[in-house]
Amino acid sequence: MKGTGVALITPFKKDLSIDFDGLSNIIENCISGGVNYLVALGTTGETATLNETEKNQIYRFIVEQVNKRVPCIAGIGGNDTRAICNQLNHFNYAGYDAILSVSPYYNKPNQEGIFLHYTEVAAHSNVPVILYNVPGRTGSNMSVATTLRLAENPNIVAIKEASGNPEQFMDIIQAKPANFYVISGDDNLTLPFVSMGMSGVISVIAQAYPKAFSNMVQMGVNGEIAEAKKIHYQLYAMMKAIFMDGNPGGIKALLEIQGICSQFVRLPLAPVKEDVYTFIQELEHQLKNN
Protein backbone atom coordinates (compact mmCIF):
# COMPACT_ATOMS: atom_id res chain seq x y z
CA MET A 1 0.00 0.00 0.00
CA LYS A 2 3.05 2.27 -0.04
CA GLY A 3 4.63 3.98 -3.04
CA THR A 4 3.32 3.80 -6.60
CA GLY A 5 0.57 1.50 -7.76
CA VAL A 6 -0.64 1.53 -11.36
CA ALA A 7 -4.28 1.37 -12.44
CA LEU A 8 -3.74 -0.72 -15.57
CA ILE A 9 -5.63 0.02 -18.77
CA THR A 10 -7.15 -2.76 -20.87
CA PRO A 11 -5.65 -2.37 -24.35
CA PHE A 12 -7.80 -3.39 -27.31
CA LYS A 13 -7.09 -4.37 -30.90
CA LYS A 14 -8.84 -2.69 -33.82
CA ASP A 15 -11.69 -5.24 -33.61
CA LEU A 16 -11.97 -4.33 -29.88
CA SER A 17 -10.85 -7.74 -28.68
CA ILE A 18 -8.36 -7.68 -25.79
CA ASP A 19 -4.78 -6.98 -26.84
CA PHE A 20 -2.85 -9.25 -24.46
CA ASP A 21 0.46 -8.41 -26.15
CA GLY A 22 -0.17 -4.74 -25.42
CA LEU A 23 -1.09 -5.57 -21.82
CA SER A 24 2.15 -7.54 -21.50
CA ASN A 25 4.09 -4.51 -22.78
CA ILE A 26 2.49 -2.28 -20.16
CA ILE A 27 3.14 -4.70 -17.31
CA GLU A 28 6.81 -5.11 -18.28
CA ASN A 29 7.18 -1.34 -18.66
CA CYS A 30 5.77 -0.83 -15.17
CA ILE A 31 7.86 -3.50 -13.45
CA SER A 32 11.11 -2.50 -15.16
CA GLY A 33 10.35 1.10 -14.23
CA GLY A 34 10.13 0.27 -10.54
CA VAL A 35 6.44 0.61 -9.67
CA ASN A 36 5.49 -0.99 -6.37
CA TYR A 37 2.26 -2.80 -7.30
CA LEU A 38 -0.32 -3.21 -10.06
CA VAL A 39 -4.11 -2.86 -9.99
CA ALA A 40 -6.17 -4.99 -12.38
CA LEU A 41 -9.58 -3.90 -13.64
CA GLY A 42 -10.26 -0.65 -11.91
CA THR A 43 -12.17 2.13 -13.66
CA THR A 44 -9.19 2.83 -15.93
CA GLY A 45 -9.39 -0.78 -17.13
CA GLU A 46 -12.81 -0.13 -18.75
CA THR A 47 -14.21 -2.87 -16.55
CA ALA A 48 -17.81 -1.79 -17.17
CA THR A 49 -17.58 -2.92 -20.82
CA LEU A 50 -15.90 -6.28 -20.19
CA ASN A 51 -17.90 -9.48 -19.83
CA GLU A 52 -17.21 -12.01 -17.10
CA THR A 53 -15.12 -14.26 -19.34
CA GLU A 54 -12.92 -11.33 -20.39
CA LYS A 55 -12.51 -10.17 -16.80
CA ASN A 56 -11.38 -13.59 -15.67
CA GLN A 57 -8.97 -13.85 -18.60
CA ILE A 58 -7.43 -10.50 -17.65
CA TYR A 59 -7.23 -11.32 -13.92
CA ARG A 60 -5.35 -14.54 -14.73
CA PHE A 61 -3.14 -13.05 -17.45
CA ILE A 62 -1.91 -10.26 -15.19
CA VAL A 63 -0.84 -12.49 -12.29
CA GLU A 64 0.79 -14.98 -14.64
CA GLN A 65 2.71 -12.23 -16.43
CA VAL A 66 3.74 -10.58 -13.17
CA ASN A 67 4.81 -13.93 -11.70
CA LYS A 68 5.11 -12.58 -8.13
CA ARG A 69 7.57 -9.83 -9.07
CA VAL A 70 5.31 -7.16 -7.57
CA PRO A 71 2.05 -7.39 -5.58
CA CYS A 72 -1.23 -7.44 -7.54
CA ILE A 73 -4.56 -5.95 -6.52
CA ALA A 74 -7.87 -6.95 -8.13
CA GLY A 75 -10.52 -4.34 -8.80
CA ILE A 76 -13.80 -5.88 -7.64
CA GLY A 77 -16.65 -3.48 -6.96
CA GLY A 78 -20.10 -2.39 -7.99
CA ASN A 79 -23.49 -1.21 -6.81
CA ASP A 80 -25.15 -4.55 -6.07
CA THR A 81 -23.77 -5.75 -2.75
CA ARG A 82 -25.07 -9.31 -3.09
CA ALA A 83 -23.60 -9.67 -6.57
CA ILE A 84 -20.19 -8.41 -5.43
CA CYS A 85 -20.17 -10.75 -2.43
CA ASN A 86 -21.11 -13.64 -4.70
CA GLN A 87 -18.23 -12.71 -7.03
CA LEU A 88 -15.86 -12.63 -4.06
CA ASN A 89 -17.07 -16.05 -2.92
CA HIS A 90 -16.09 -17.54 -6.29
CA PHE A 91 -13.05 -15.41 -7.12
CA ASN A 92 -9.68 -17.07 -7.78
CA TYR A 93 -7.48 -15.18 -5.33
CA ALA A 94 -4.25 -16.90 -6.41
CA GLY A 95 -1.68 -14.18 -7.09
CA TYR A 96 -3.74 -11.33 -5.62
CA ASP A 97 -2.77 -9.61 -2.39
CA ALA A 98 -5.80 -7.34 -1.95
CA ILE A 99 -8.91 -6.05 -3.68
CA LEU A 100 -9.79 -2.48 -4.57
CA SER A 101 -13.54 -1.93 -4.30
CA VAL A 102 -15.26 1.23 -5.49
CA SER A 103 -17.99 2.86 -3.43
CA PRO A 104 -21.43 2.01 -4.87
CA TYR A 105 -22.42 4.24 -7.78
CA TYR A 106 -25.67 5.33 -9.44
CA ASN A 107 -28.03 4.23 -6.65
CA LYS A 108 -26.31 6.77 -4.31
CA PRO A 109 -26.60 5.09 -0.89
CA ASN A 110 -26.49 7.15 2.30
CA GLN A 111 -23.50 6.84 4.64
CA GLU A 112 -25.00 3.92 6.54
CA GLY A 113 -25.58 2.10 3.26
CA ILE A 114 -21.96 2.66 2.23
CA PHE A 115 -20.76 1.42 5.61
CA LEU A 116 -22.93 -1.72 5.49
CA HIS A 117 -21.93 -2.40 1.87
CA TYR A 118 -18.22 -2.39 2.66
CA THR A 119 -18.76 -4.38 5.85
CA GLU A 120 -20.32 -7.13 3.73
CA VAL A 121 -17.55 -6.89 1.11
CA ALA A 122 -14.87 -7.23 3.81
CA ALA A 123 -16.66 -10.23 5.31
CA HIS A 124 -16.68 -12.05 1.96
CA SER A 125 -13.15 -11.19 0.77
CA ASN A 126 -10.32 -13.65 1.39
CA VAL A 127 -7.75 -10.83 1.08
CA PRO A 128 -7.57 -7.30 2.52
CA VAL A 129 -9.88 -4.64 1.10
CA ILE A 130 -8.93 -1.18 -0.15
CA LEU A 131 -11.82 1.28 -0.18
CA TYR A 132 -12.16 3.54 -3.22
CA ASN A 133 -13.83 6.92 -2.81
CA VAL A 134 -14.30 8.70 -6.15
CA PRO A 135 -17.33 11.02 -5.91
CA GLY A 136 -16.84 12.33 -9.46
CA ARG A 137 -17.77 8.87 -10.76
CA THR A 138 -20.05 7.46 -8.06
CA GLY A 139 -22.24 10.50 -7.38
CA SER A 140 -21.71 10.23 -3.61
CA ASN A 141 -18.88 11.00 -1.22
CA MET A 142 -17.77 8.61 1.50
CA SER A 143 -17.49 10.85 4.54
CA VAL A 144 -14.57 11.04 6.94
CA ALA A 145 -16.71 9.49 9.69
CA THR A 146 -17.71 6.54 7.48
CA THR A 147 -14.11 5.97 6.40
CA LEU A 148 -12.90 5.96 10.00
CA ARG A 149 -15.63 3.51 11.03
CA LEU A 150 -14.59 1.18 8.23
CA ALA A 151 -10.90 1.61 9.10
CA GLU A 152 -11.60 -0.26 12.36
CA ASN A 153 -12.50 -3.38 10.35
CA PRO A 154 -9.47 -5.72 10.45
CA ASN A 155 -9.93 -6.72 6.79
CA ILE A 156 -10.08 -3.12 5.51
CA VAL A 157 -6.54 -1.80 5.23
CA ALA A 158 -6.57 1.37 3.10
CA ILE A 159 -8.55 3.88 1.09
CA LYS A 160 -7.87 5.23 -2.36
CA GLU A 161 -9.03 8.82 -1.80
CA ALA A 162 -9.99 10.53 -5.06
CA SER A 163 -12.32 13.18 -3.71
CA GLY A 164 -9.64 15.81 -4.40
CA ASN A 165 -10.48 17.38 -1.05
CA PRO A 166 -7.36 17.95 1.10
CA GLU A 167 -9.40 18.65 4.23
CA GLN A 168 -11.13 15.30 3.93
CA PHE A 169 -8.00 13.18 3.63
CA MET A 170 -6.12 15.19 6.26
CA ASP A 171 -8.97 14.60 8.71
CA ILE A 172 -8.74 10.88 7.92
CA ILE A 173 -4.95 10.82 8.34
CA GLN A 174 -5.13 12.59 11.70
CA ALA A 175 -7.66 10.15 13.18
CA LYS A 176 -7.01 6.83 11.39
CA PRO A 177 -5.51 3.71 12.98
CA ALA A 178 -1.75 3.37 12.47
CA ASN A 179 -2.13 0.34 10.17
CA PHE A 180 -4.63 2.00 7.81
CA TYR A 181 -3.21 3.70 4.70
CA VAL A 182 -4.51 6.65 2.69
CA ILE A 183 -3.63 6.47 -1.02
CA SER A 184 -3.95 9.26 -3.58
CA GLY A 185 -6.22 8.75 -6.57
CA ASP A 186 -5.16 11.95 -8.36
CA ASP A 187 -1.89 11.96 -10.31
CA ASN A 188 -1.52 15.73 -10.47
CA LEU A 189 -2.07 16.10 -6.70
CA THR A 190 0.05 13.15 -5.60
CA LEU A 191 3.19 15.01 -4.55
CA PRO A 192 1.44 17.63 -2.38
CA PHE A 193 -0.83 14.95 -0.92
CA VAL A 194 2.08 12.60 -0.15
CA SER A 195 3.90 15.47 1.52
CA MET A 196 0.86 15.84 3.81
CA GLY A 197 0.79 12.20 4.87
CA MET A 198 -0.59 9.98 2.11
CA SER A 199 1.32 6.72 1.68
CA GLY A 200 1.46 6.85 -2.12
CA VAL A 201 -0.78 6.71 -5.19
CA ILE A 202 -2.70 4.42 -7.49
CA SER A 203 -1.70 6.16 -10.68
CA VAL A 204 -2.77 6.31 -14.30
CA ILE A 205 0.21 8.16 -15.76
CA ALA A 206 2.78 5.88 -14.09
CA GLN A 207 2.19 3.21 -16.75
CA ALA A 208 3.63 5.65 -19.29
CA TYR A 209 6.39 7.09 -17.06
CA PRO A 210 6.93 4.43 -14.39
CA LYS A 211 10.49 5.29 -13.41
CA ALA A 212 10.09 9.06 -13.20
CA PHE A 213 6.74 8.95 -11.43
CA SER A 214 7.80 6.22 -8.98
CA ASN A 215 10.95 8.19 -8.15
CA MET A 216 8.88 11.30 -7.52
CA VAL A 217 6.53 9.46 -5.16
CA GLN A 218 9.37 7.80 -3.26
CA MET A 219 11.15 11.12 -2.87
CA GLY A 220 7.91 12.64 -1.60
CA VAL A 221 7.43 9.85 0.93
CA ASN A 222 11.05 10.30 2.06
CA GLY A 223 10.62 14.07 2.45
CA GLU A 224 12.97 14.91 -0.44
CA ILE A 225 10.52 17.50 -1.72
CA ALA A 226 12.91 19.74 -3.66
CA GLU A 227 14.01 16.88 -5.94
CA ALA A 228 10.49 15.48 -6.19
CA LYS A 229 9.16 18.88 -7.29
CA LYS A 230 11.41 18.87 -10.34
CA ILE A 231 9.80 15.65 -11.61
CA HIS A 232 6.33 16.83 -10.62
CA TYR A 233 6.62 19.93 -12.79
CA GLN A 234 8.24 18.03 -15.65
CA LEU A 235 5.20 15.76 -15.81
CA TYR A 236 2.55 18.21 -14.62
CA ALA A 237 1.31 19.32 -18.04
CA MET A 238 1.01 15.70 -19.18
CA MET A 239 -0.77 14.72 -15.97
CA LYS A 240 -3.47 17.23 -16.89
CA ALA A 241 -3.42 16.51 -20.63
CA ILE A 242 -4.26 12.82 -20.36
CA PHE A 243 -7.49 13.70 -18.54
CA MET A 244 -8.53 16.56 -20.83
CA ASP A 245 -10.87 14.39 -22.91
CA GLY A 246 -11.63 11.53 -20.56
CA ASN A 247 -9.94 8.57 -18.93
CA PRO A 248 -8.61 6.15 -20.19
CA GLY A 249 -8.75 7.79 -23.63
CA GLY A 250 -5.90 10.14 -22.78
CA ILE A 251 -3.51 7.59 -21.33
CA LYS A 252 -4.27 5.22 -24.21
CA ALA A 253 -3.39 7.98 -26.69
CA LEU A 254 -0.09 8.55 -24.86
CA LEU A 255 0.73 4.83 -24.79
CA GLU A 256 0.01 4.63 -28.53
CA ILE A 257 2.35 7.56 -29.16
CA GLN A 258 4.99 5.73 -27.10
CA GLY A 259 4.49 2.59 -29.23
CA ILE A 260 3.30 0.44 -26.31
CA CYS A 261 -0.26 -0.33 -27.45
CA SER A 262 -3.11 1.15 -29.51
CA GLN A 263 -5.59 3.76 -28.30
CA PHE A 264 -8.81 1.86 -29.10
CA VAL A 265 -11.59 2.11 -26.50
CA ARG A 266 -15.02 0.51 -26.29
CA LEU A 267 -18.24 2.49 -26.55
CA PRO A 268 -19.64 4.49 -24.88
CA LEU A 269 -16.09 5.79 -24.62
CA ALA A 270 -14.54 7.38 -27.68
CA PRO A 271 -10.90 8.20 -28.51
CA VAL A 272 -9.65 11.64 -27.53
CA LYS A 273 -10.24 14.44 -30.01
CA GLU A 274 -7.60 15.07 -32.64
CA ASP A 275 -6.41 18.33 -31.08
CA VAL A 276 -5.98 16.65 -27.70
CA TYR A 277 -4.05 13.78 -29.31
CA THR A 278 -1.77 16.29 -31.04
CA PHE A 279 -1.23 18.17 -27.78
CA ILE A 280 -0.29 14.95 -25.96
CA GLN A 281 2.04 14.10 -28.83
CA GLU A 282 3.75 17.49 -28.56
CA LEU A 283 4.18 17.13 -24.79
CA GLU A 284 5.65 13.65 -25.20
CA HIS A 285 8.11 14.98 -27.79
CA GLN A 286 9.19 17.69 -25.36
CA LEU A 287 9.63 15.20 -22.51
CA LYS A 288 11.71 12.87 -24.65
CA ASN A 289 14.01 15.70 -25.67
CA ASN A 290 14.51 17.22 -22.23
Image (cartoon, rainbow, N blue to C red):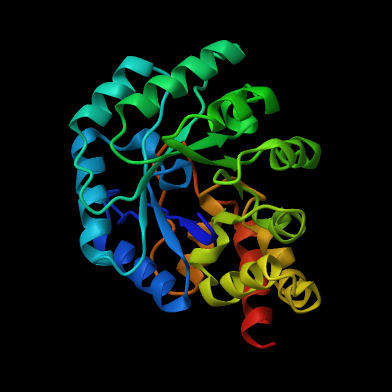
Task: Tell how many labels.
Answer: 0
* Image quadrant where residue 28 sits: bottom left
| Residue 240 makes an appearance in the image | no
**Residue at 61%, 39% in the rendered image:** 177
User: Residue 128 versus residue 177: which sits nearer the camera?
Assistant: 177
**Residue at 54%, 77% in the rendered image:** 211
Compared with 229, 171 (above or below) is above
**Residue at 47%, 15% in the rendered image:** 116
Compared with 66, 201 (above or below) is above
**Quadrant occupied by the C terminus:** bottom right
Q: From the viewer's perspective, is 200 left or right of 253?
A: right
For this orientation, the residue located farthest to the bottom is 289
User: Residue 165 versus residue 243: which sits nearer the camera?
Assistant: 165
* Image quadrant where residue 175 sits: top right
**Residue at 30%, 26% in the rendered image:** 124
User: Residue 171 versus residue 140: which sits nearer the camera?
Assistant: 171
Percent position of residue 94, x then y: 20, 50
Percent position of residue 150, x then y: 54, 27
Percent position of residue 142, x then y: 63, 25
Q: From the viewer's perspective, is 170 left or right of 119?
A: right
Q: From the viewer's perspective, is 77 left or right of 232?
A: left
User: Residue 109 versus residue 250: which sits nearer the camera?
Assistant: 109
Compared with 28, 5 (above or below) is above
| Residue 182 makes an appearance in the image | yes
Percent position of residue 73, x then y: 37, 49
